[in-house]
């Protein structure tokens, strides 16, 4: 049941994201006077629709996208010099111009999309991706401000009884002859919250760990809160070789593959993990970081698709960094919602789902900005080119150029559409027969 709930959550949020994306296009288009004849969520057969004013609103059977039909997307033939088609590509462009012109009602050419100024076209076409970015910001804010992220607290979960050598097996326990750990010798207990160390008020685990590592073999006063009361203790750290951790608190390794160590102060205590709410400033910083990470993945998308095909048809296991489609995203949501591992509570599941849904909207934002039609970025690039031509003409004192013949990009749009459809089918197949697992 939990698995199904997770999948349904993703489906609902995905549909809402698609719907709001199209709202981001529709609202400014209507504000600028463009006639919007259709607003649809999904593709394929129409399940439900209702006409309000001059716009038909509806829901279609295949929830893998959506669209708004903006009248006059392509300038008519007379506006671009009435080009005569000489090739199959030219005929495609001519057919697109004719179909676009037929949608313009008599006397309403001024309401066609191609009539908009460059800034207004940019606002309309960027409205959809920006809406996805805003959704990501809201989801990140709920996650970071409402729940927080897992982090180490100043409350102790474990106080080591002895000092176990660094090269000992992972399941090694204390044995006769092992030195008592400084923490145990000082009387520290699990559940103690460190309030003060060597006269310094403790605000975070990172602060405490840094102070301990900098301390030599000398006794320092420690104040802990135990059962609601402050207890004064004295601890004498020992200097020991301990692993050097990176920014993600993971071991670092040298060229030979050995763990990098350093001689630092050691007490033998482990913090308790807890959810720590972040500040408002962490929201935009996190979104910017995720956006950059997503952009780097999109920049290497062709190579990622090749790797996906090799692993899918070559029998190799998919890498954890492999791209996934809607089926994979649904599986992730189901696995997160139904996972019953130790220490995984409902809040952590909600955080994981929010994180995934925010990342999905960031991916929609970045992907739609690829400057290729029929993606929004293709229309943005065309509008910028049109605006640049007009600015150059104005600076040179030349007549104002007519609208850019965007219908010439229709063959490219069809090609990109077919390629994206092929990648989508490959993702569905790969997610079914060779899925990426999370654990």
Image (cartoon, grey):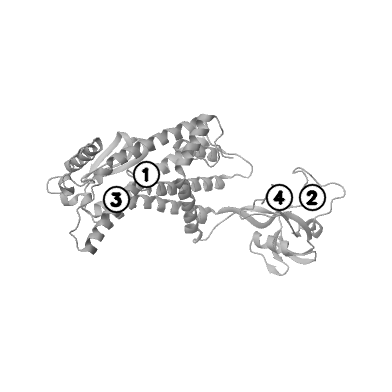
Q: Earlier in the sequence, mark 3 or mark 1?
A: 1
Measure how far apart labels 3 and 1 are at the Cα level: 23 Å
Q: Nearer the viewer, mark 2 or mark 4?
A: 4
Q: Nearer the viewer, mark 3 or mark 1?
A: 3
Quarter of the figure with residue 74: top left
Is 193 rendered above or below residue 66?
below
Quarter of the figure with residue 386: bottom left
Residue at position x 49%, y 45% from top?
Answer: 356
Location of mark 1 (residue): 18
Location of mark 4 (residue): 259
Location of mark 3 (residue): 382
Q: Quadrant of the C terminus?
A: top right
Measure how far apart labels 2 and 1 are at the Cα level: 55 Å
Is 131 rendered above or below residue 43?
below
Residue 141 percent location from the top left of the image: 47, 55
Quarter of the figure with residue 8: top left
Measure how far apart labels 2 and 3 are at the Cα level: 65 Å
Location of mark 2 (residue): 165
Q: Earlier in the sequence, mark 2 or mark 1?
A: 1
Measure how far apart labels 2 and 4 are at the Cα level: 13 Å
Dot 3 falls on a residue whose secondary structure is helix
Residue at position x 63%, y 45% from top?
Answer: 343
For disc 1, the neighbor class at 10 Å (few under 14, some 14 to 19, many from 20) is: many
Q: Nearer the viewer, mark 2 or mark 1?
A: 2
Q: Earlier in the sequence, mark 2 or mark 3?
A: 2
């Amino acid at each position: 049941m939990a698995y199904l709930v997770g999948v349904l959550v993703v489906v609902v949020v995905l549909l809402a994201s698609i719907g709001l994306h199209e709202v981001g296009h529709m609202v400014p288009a209507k504000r600028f006077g463009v006639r919007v004849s259709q607003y649809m969520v999904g593709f394929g057969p129409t399940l439900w629709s209702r006409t309000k004013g001059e716009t038909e609103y509806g829901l279609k059977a295949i929830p893998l996208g959506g669209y708004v039909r903006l009248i006059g997307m392509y300038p008519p033939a007379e506006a671009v010099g009435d080009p005569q088609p000489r090739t199959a590509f030219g005929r495609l462009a001519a057919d697109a111009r004719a179909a676009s012109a037929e949608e313009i009602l008599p006397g309403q050419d001024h309401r066609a999309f191609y009539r908009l100024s460059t800034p207004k076209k940019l606002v309309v076409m960027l409205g959809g991706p920006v809406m996805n970015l805003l959704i990501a910001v809201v989801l990140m804010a709920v996650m970071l401000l409402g729940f927080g992220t897992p982090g180490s607290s100043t409350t102790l979960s474990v106080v080591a009884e002895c000092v176990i050598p660094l090269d000992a097996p992972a399941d090694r326990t204390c044995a006769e002859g092992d030195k008592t750990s400084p923490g145990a010798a000082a009387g520290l207990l699990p559940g103690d919250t460190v309030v003060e160390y060597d006269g310094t008020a403790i605000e975070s685990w990172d602060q405490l760990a840094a102070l301990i590592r900098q301390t030599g073999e000398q006794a320092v006063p420690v104040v802990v809160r135990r059962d609601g009361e402050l207890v004064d203790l004295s601890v004498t750290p020992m200097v020991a070789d301990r692993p050097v951790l990176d920014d993600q608190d993971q071991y670092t390794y040298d060229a030979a593959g050995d763990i990098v160590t350093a001689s630092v102060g050691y007490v033998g205590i482990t913090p308790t993990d807890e959810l720590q709410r972040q500040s408002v400033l962490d929201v935009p910083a996190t979104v910017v970081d995720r956006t950059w990470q997503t952009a780097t993945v999109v920049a290497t998308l062709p190579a990622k698709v090749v790797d996906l095909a090799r692993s899918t048809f070559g029998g190799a296991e998919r890498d954890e960094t492999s791209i996934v489609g809607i089926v994979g995203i649904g599986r992730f949501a189901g696995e997160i919602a139904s996972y019953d591992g130790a220490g995984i509570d409902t809040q952590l599941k909600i955080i994981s789902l929010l994180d995934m849904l925010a990342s999905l909207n960031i991916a929609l934002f970045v992907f739609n900005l690829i400057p290729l039609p029929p993606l929004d970025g293709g229309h943005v690039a065309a509008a910028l080119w049109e605006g640049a031509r007009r600015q150059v003409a104005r600076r040179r004192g030349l007549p104002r150029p007519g609208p850019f013949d965007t219908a010439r990009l229709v063959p490219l749009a069809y090609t990109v559409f077919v390629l994206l459809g092929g990648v989508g089918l490959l993702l569905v197949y790969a997610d079914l027969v060779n899925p990426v697992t999370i654990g």
